[in-house]
Amino acid sequence: MSQYDSIDFTDLLALSDAEVVTHSYVHDVPLPSGKVLALVTLDNGMDYKRPNTLGPQSLLEFDRLLVTQRDRAAAGEIHAVAVTGKEFILAAGADLSRVSAVPSKAVAVKLAQLGHRALGRLGQLGVPSFVFINGLALGGGLEIALNADYRTIDANASAVALPEVFLGLIPGWGGAYLLPNLIGIENALKVIIENPLKNNRMLKPRDALELGIADAMFGSARFLEESLLWADAVLNGQPVSRPNQPGKIERLAKWNIAVNIARKSVEEKLGMVAKSPYLALELLEQARKVDKEAAFAREDEAIASLIVGDQFHASMYAFDLVQKRAKKPAGAPDSSLARPVGKVGVIGAGLMARQFALLFVRKLKVPVVLTDINQDKLDEALAYIHAEIQATHDKGRISSDENQRLQALVSGTTNPAEFSDADWVIEAVFEELTVKQDVFAAIEQHVSEDAILATNTSSLSVAEIGAKLSHPERLVGFHFFNPVAVMPLVEVVNAPQTNETSLATAMAVAKELGKTAVITTDSPGFVVNRLLARLLGEAMHAVDLGTPFKVVDESVAPFGMPMAPFELLDLVGLKVGAHVLDTHFAAFPDRFFRSDNLHKLAEHGSLIVRGRTDKITGYDRGAEAIVKGGTTPLTAEEIRLRIEDGLADEIHRMLEEKVVSAPEDIDLCMIMGAGWPFQMGGATPFLDRIGASQRVFGGTFHTPLIAGTNA
């Protein structure tokens, strides 16, 4: 008897009027031993582009079917139950399309309880239960498997994860209790907390097997047949080993220590604004000492509080941007205009050039040639790239053949004539206008008429960079963020002279690289750097007035940003930061700041002090001495208001200037390029919620206001 059996869930059907129902189909499979297994297949009747999801109707149907199988098991008709999905997909989790319409916490609690009841049936059948993870298994999809007794996984399943914390939620259908008790607390913390906070990192099937989430793994060609044979063996006494399942020592001595370490890590990375990671940590901590019934009740309460809270709604706005708007970039030309790229040229051999070359060869798998006037520097760059490819092979991520092929595709030259057959040439030289102009003017003499030229400038005018070109229409801005392999955004800059072919090719290249591309006009700083320059300018101005570094950094904690202003400055480089502020001051002297102190700090070379584990321990004393002398320090509250109003003002101006098509593009850039937290829902709705938009220009960026967390 389930604790949820007496609950009437029919009122949840009001939330499922547009639900694409994932149906549960069952048929009996005779096993070689003579036993009978009831195989349940989840299928929403759509193609693979629309994965199975679990809304109220889907859950109620699944629940009814499992009750029937329980009764059949009691009658001796079947000896086991297994669940699998349609081709390539088990389930992508809860149907979130109507969750934002949940009218009250009481209804939200019921939604959590229904999931627990339906999925929990897998542990109440009276016979062993199996889940054959034949493809994508995310969130509630993975929790289906966790609620079963045994699990197999397809070696080619696309992804396995519990991404809820990334979306401002927690695993609410058993995951926060079942997973740590299956694979140990440290592994569970990685899956539930660490991976979602690392840009929603997923597990590969091999990871799931090694962690113990899956008990066995089989190839795709015979996945179902092998899974059935394995299940038959288990039913007939074959033991199942789970080496990561926690024992007494872990429960008594290691559990709380691991949770406390994880909590401190989250505090350092996110501050205290985001709610979902801390609720998840509480549930994981309690999973050691409460029973399943109590744990599920706590999950019901926790997820309900998040569903009706502001941060989930803000996260869903951000998630919608990343899932939908990012895939259909505003202002993108017809993709058929894009030219194929069969060879890439990279101008330069420094850190950024090396990252570019590595990314291009890994993703495009075409010849990539670097050029530099310094042969020693080229040799260093090639050694770095080859070592990185080799390391990928050594980790088992590429085959030996692929390793050799990729390494052979990368070369270096001091002779730019070897760029003659390159289709795409990108520069990675010093951020100085005349340097970039001269580099492109020189390289144009060697490339074909059809070659597209790209500049990685972070703040300079693309049109001015192309001023010495005979064919400036072939030049496009292609601004990566550091580290290149990790940061998902590319700002594609459409200068006045850029033609549609160049723009279309740039968008196609970004897509092949796996990046999110946002088209901007050719204006100083484009989107991300312009807004960061406004923020960092206000921060440096406050220091110039006599405000301590620490007060400034603490002032922006309510934003939930991954880095405080001076940690960010330290990361991008003080000289780079000074250059960016100078560029924006030159363009907009009425509202951006130039700081002599920042130039002095750049010469000093140090700002942040870090300990042995790279943790920030304070500020450099020499840096503090350099900025000493201001007599009118600001309070943290004054700084926060200045930054809020400054961002609202700058975004409003950018939209009036049509730097991008809409506020959503600003938000997409800040989420993907600056790490603006999902839980804050994008910069523009955040500024609407806190009243900055109204204070600055007497309106809002969105109507009606998008719900979200109020700082």
Image (cartoon, rainbow, N blue to C red):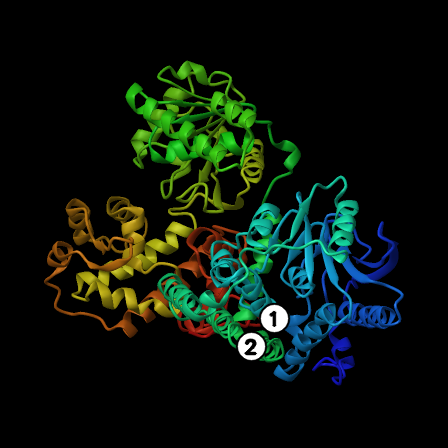
Residue under label 2, please give it. 302
User: On the rendered structure, is 436 left or right of 703?
Assistant: left
Relative depth, front residue between 240 and 349: 240
Please state, as top left, top right, bottom left or bottom right, where the N terminus lies in the image.
Answer: bottom right
Outermost residue to the front = 237
Specify which label sits upstream in the sequence, 1 or 2: 1
Q: Residues within 10 Å of mark 1 (few under 14, many from 20)?
A: many
Residue found at x 32% / y 69%: 640
Residue found at x 43% / y 69%: 697
- At label 2, which amino acid type do we have? Ala
Relative depth, front residue between 527 and 54: 54
Please state, as top left, top right, bottom left or bottom right, where the C terminus lies in the image.
Answer: bottom left
Marks 1/2: CA–CA distance: 8 Å
Q: Residues within 10 Å of mark 2 (few under 14, many from 20)?
A: many
- At label 1, which amino acid type do we have? Gly
User: On the rendered structure, is 41 left or right of 519?
Assistant: right
Residue under label 1, please give it. 172
Q: Position of residue 557 (x, y in %)?
A: 35, 68
How many numbered discs sit on the rendered protein?
A: 2
Location of residue 132 (image quadrant): bottom right
Vertical arrangement, residue 152 with respect to residue 511, above or below: below
Is label 2 in a helix, a strand or a loop?
helix
Is label 1 in a helix, a strand or a loop?
loop
Q: Are marks 1 and 2 in contact (CB under 8 Å)?
A: yes
Residue found at x 28% / y 52%: 569
> Would residue 590 be seen by someone viewing this image from the given angle?
no
Residue found at x 74% / y 78%: 12
